[in-house]
């Protein structure tokens, strides 16, 4: 196996990170399904695109598809632990964009639409990015 692929897939993490990865993946995948498919009370691509445009992220359709796709497919990747580091990188960037374009001006707490939830997801994504997918993952199975 090439050195680059091994570095991307390698994990030294244990079961704790596996649990964190799965839970964070479920949350991201569900949010992506809201944006892409209108699932779980979401607005689908059209509604998400309109919102993206309203906060200055244009073109709205492209941004909705990029955000929803990153959340949905990145979340699925975290759930199964396949290419977890690249998925976590995309989700880290997405969380930073959400924090600084939507939530930062509202303070920390969720009761005011603050950034605490996005910050927690950012922390989970960064943990996977740094440590890898954990013991129960496709990445680990490939590298062993």
Image: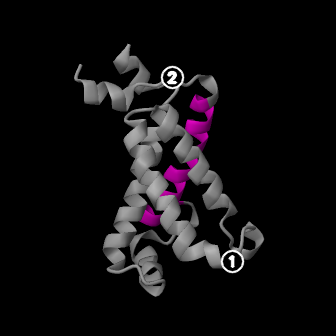
Report the quarter where the C terminus lies: top left
> Where in the figure is residue 120, as x and y percent of width and height?
65, 53
Placement of 20 over or under 126, stated as above or below: above
> Where in the figure is residue 96, as x and y percent of width and height?
51, 62
Q: Residue 21 magenta-drawn?
A: yes
Residue range highlighted in magenta: 17-39
Spot the residue most to the bottom.
54
Q: How many residues crowd mark 2 within 10 Å: few (<14), some (14–19), many (20+)? A: few
Q: State the residue at coordinates (52%, 75%).
A: 101
User: Is residue 48 something that shows in the picture?
Assistant: yes
> Label 2 belongs to which residue?
12
> Label 1 belongs to which residue?
106
Q: State the residue at coordinates (43%, 21%).
A: 140
Q: Residue 132 magenta-drawn?
A: no
User: Is residue 25 something that shows in the picture?
Assistant: no
Front residue (pair 4, 31):
4
Q: State the residue at coordinates (37%, 36%).
A: 83
Which SS type dominates the magenta stretch? helix
Q: State the residue at coordinates (72%, 68%).
A: 108
Which secondary structure lies at badge 1?
helix
Please indicate whether residue 144 sits to the left or right of residue 12 in the image.
Answer: left
Front residue (pair 4, 51):
4
């Amino acid at each position: 196996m090439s050195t680059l692929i091994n570095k991307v897939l390698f994990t030294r993490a244990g079961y704790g990170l596996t649990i964190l990865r799965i839970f964070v993946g479920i949350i991201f995948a569900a949010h992506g399904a809201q944006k892409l498919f209108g699932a779980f009370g979401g607005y689908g691509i059209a509604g998400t695109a309109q919102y993206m445009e309203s906060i200055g992220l244009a073109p709205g359709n492209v941004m909705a598809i990029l955000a929803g796709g990153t959340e949905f497919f990145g979340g699925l990747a975290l759930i199964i632990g396949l290419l977890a580091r690249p998925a976590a990188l995309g989700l880290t960037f997405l969380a930073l964009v959400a924090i600084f374009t939507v939530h930062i001006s509202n303070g920390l707490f969720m009761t005011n639409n603050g950034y605490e939830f996005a910050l927690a997801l950012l922390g989970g994504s960064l943990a996977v990015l740094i440590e890898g997918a954990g013991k129960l993952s496709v990445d680990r199975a490939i590298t062993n």
